[in-house]
Image (tube, grey):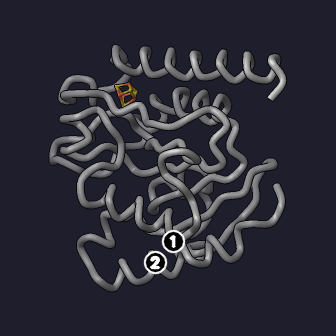
């Protein structure tokens, strides 16, 4: 890689870390009052895939890391089914960076999603991935508010130069075998259909 490209990548990585620093002290919405740790996301500038979930759960809130625990393990397996190396080729985050509560693990509210939007937009810009994986209805609605999740689940769609793949949240696959099977089929399809250009 030419030096200039390396320098640019390192500058973007530092900017990504600065975004995480801002999230760590953010008080833009009510979730700042009840969180333990913020969960900005993990991954590298230049990753091929940007993965977006609903919000941190209790394990993530304790550790500050995204998608750990059983749902996280399933996500790693699903990504592997799609030929994607979680460690080296993804940036993984959520539409809100603090645990939605009370009650614990509730869906984030529209004003919380909107307050957190700037961080997500910055992260997407800095990572630069052209392929986005949306996990669950809440992540889908953030990008396609007028459309039905059920019409697009298991499919790729394009918007403004990026490709979006839509599936259930892995937590659904932990709760119900039926959803786990659908998730597995979806991620195999992601592999089979997702290799075209963009
Ligand atoms: Fe800030 Fe987002 Fe956490 Fe709300 S959810 S306090 S906007 S980081």
Q: Is residue 38 left or right of residue 83?
A: left
Instruction: Compare residues 108 and 68 and report the one nearer the observer.
Output: 68
Q: Is residue 22 left or right of residue 45?
A: left
Give the Cα distance between marks 1 and 2.
7 Å
The residue that label 2 is drawn on is: 184
Q: Is residue 65 left or right of residue 123?
A: left
Q: Is residue 115 above or below residue 156?
A: above
Q: Residue at x 27, y 24 (%)?
A: 32
Residue 74, percent across and down?
35, 64
Residue 136, percent across and down?
44, 62
The residue that label 1 is drawn on is: 81
Q: Earlier in the sequence, mark 1 or mark 2?
A: 1
Q: Does the residue tagged 2 have its C-beta within 8 Å of any atom of ligand 1? A: no
Residue 176, percent across and down?
26, 79
Element under label 1?
helix
In the rendered image, which quarter is residue 97 located in?
top left
Q: Residue at x 30, y 60 (%)?
A: 71
Q: Is residue 64 above or below residue 92?
A: above
Is mark 1 in CB contact (under 8 Å) with mark 2?
A: yes
Give ligand 1's quarter of the image: top left
């Amino acid at each position: 890689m030419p030096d200039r490209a390396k320098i640019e990548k390192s500058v973007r990585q530092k900017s990504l870390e600065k975004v995480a620093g801002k999230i760590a002290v953010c008080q833009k919405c009510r979730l700042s009052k009840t969180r333990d740790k913020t969960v900005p996301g993990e991954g590298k500038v230049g990753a091929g895939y940007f993965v977006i979930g609903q919000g941190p759960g209790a394990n993530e809130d304790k550790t500050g890391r995204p998608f750990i625990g059983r749902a996280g393990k399933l996500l790693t397996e699903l990504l592997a089914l799609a030929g994607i190396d979680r460690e080296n080729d993804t940036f993984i985050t959520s539409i809100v960076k603090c645990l939605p509560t009370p009650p614990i693990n509730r869906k984030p509210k529209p004003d919380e999603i909107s307050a957190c939007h700037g961080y997500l937009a910055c992260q997407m810009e800095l990572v630069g991935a052209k392929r986005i994986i949306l996990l669950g209805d809440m992540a889908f609605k953030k990008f396609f508010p007028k459309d039905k999740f059920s019409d697009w689940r298991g499919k790729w769609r394009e918007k403004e130069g990026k490709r979006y793949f839509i599936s259930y949240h892995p937590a659904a696959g932990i709760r119900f075998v039926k959803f786990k099977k659908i998730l597995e089929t979806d991620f195999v399809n992601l592999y089979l259909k997702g290799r075209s250009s963009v």
